[in-house]
Image: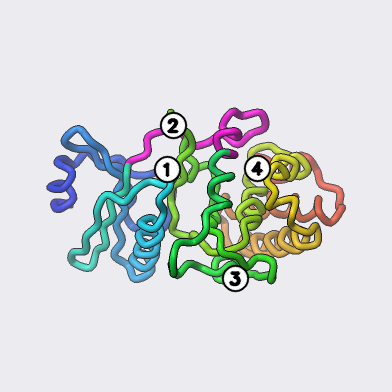
Amino acid sequence: MKVISERVGGTRVIPASDGDHAEIAATVTGGGESVFIKAAVSELGVRSLRYELLVSRSIDKPYAPAVEWDFEADGWLVVSFEHVDGARADLSPDSPDLDLLDKVLKDLIETRVPGDLPLFSPAARLGFDHPAMQGDTLVHTDLNPANLIVTPTGVRVVDWAMAAKAAPWVELALLVPWLIGSGHPPEQAEGWLARHPAWDATAPGILDDFASSNAAKWSLKARQSTAPWMHDLAAWTGRWSAYRSGESVSSSAGGK
């Protein structure tokens, strides 16, 4: 912490309320400025943070926070990111944040993976695969409201620790459960995403397969865990899969 204090000029620390990819994640303020610090010491934590550092340095987009600096000491990897001040996005129906997110999505799903950046494949990231999931688009894969920060200049997308290289429609499909969890019926969630050509260009059978595979994955994870967020995702992905297969779904299923 001493090295961080010397770099920032102070040690006022506010721990992050979300995220689990690093042992330390906090806003550190000093000398009139704030930075967001992530630090890891475990093998898994360091590997994940090193991956996030690699991805973040390769993205030259206004919606992605910049890397300020990084260093390693005593087995710790410490990374300082641009501090993003704002509220998490509200993805509920009729929220003005949806229009802000749409602007980012249009740019994001047209962003190709830069150079030879060694990103996760769809199978490695999601645990299931389909030939149509392959592509060369930079896919964040976790656009949940906590990773979408609304600022005066628009939505910023944080936490790139699980970015992958895939077809552009995969990003949209992974957003469906979060829209459902925010109050959109499955049909409405799909209708909102249909404004993007990448969604309409994807064959219904491919989306059926994705929804079914994703629901099966989260159902299994929920049975093995008591974490509330896993059970939420199991419910939301289940609602979408049931909708696509034509099953009757209660409007209250998976609601919060």
Which amino acid type corresponds to the residue marked 4 in the rendered image? Answer: Leu
Question: As shown in the figure, which amino acid type bears the numbered disc 2?
Answer: Thr
For the residues labelled 1 and 2, say whether their Cβ atoms are less than 8 Å apart. yes
Image coords of residue 195 (percent x, y): 70, 42
Marks 1 and 4, the one that precedes in the sequence: 1
Q: Are there few (<14), some (14-19), or many (20+) residues within 10 Å of tag 1?
A: few
Query: For the residues marked 1 and 4, what is the alpha-carbon distance in whole angstroms?
Result: 24 Å
Magenta stretch in the rendered image: 83-102
Image-quadrant location for residue 58: bottom left
The image's mark for residue 153 is 2
Looking at the picture, which amino acid does disc 3 mark? Ala
Residue 242, image quadrant: bottom right
Tag 4 near tag 2, CB within 8 Å: no
Q: Circle 4 sits on which residue? A: 179
3D distance between C-alphas at marks 1 and 2: 9 Å
- In percent of width and height, residue 89 lies at 52, 36
Depth-wise, is mark 1 or mark 3 nearer the camera? 1
Q: Which mark is residue 143?
A: none
How much space separates mark 3 and mark 4, taking CA atoms?
23 Å
Q: CA distance from mark 1 to mark 3?
A: 28 Å
Whichever of labels 1 and 3 marks the residue nearer the N terminus, that label is 1
Circle 3 is placed at which residue position? Answer: 123
Q: Earlier in the sequence, mark 3 or mark 2?
A: 3
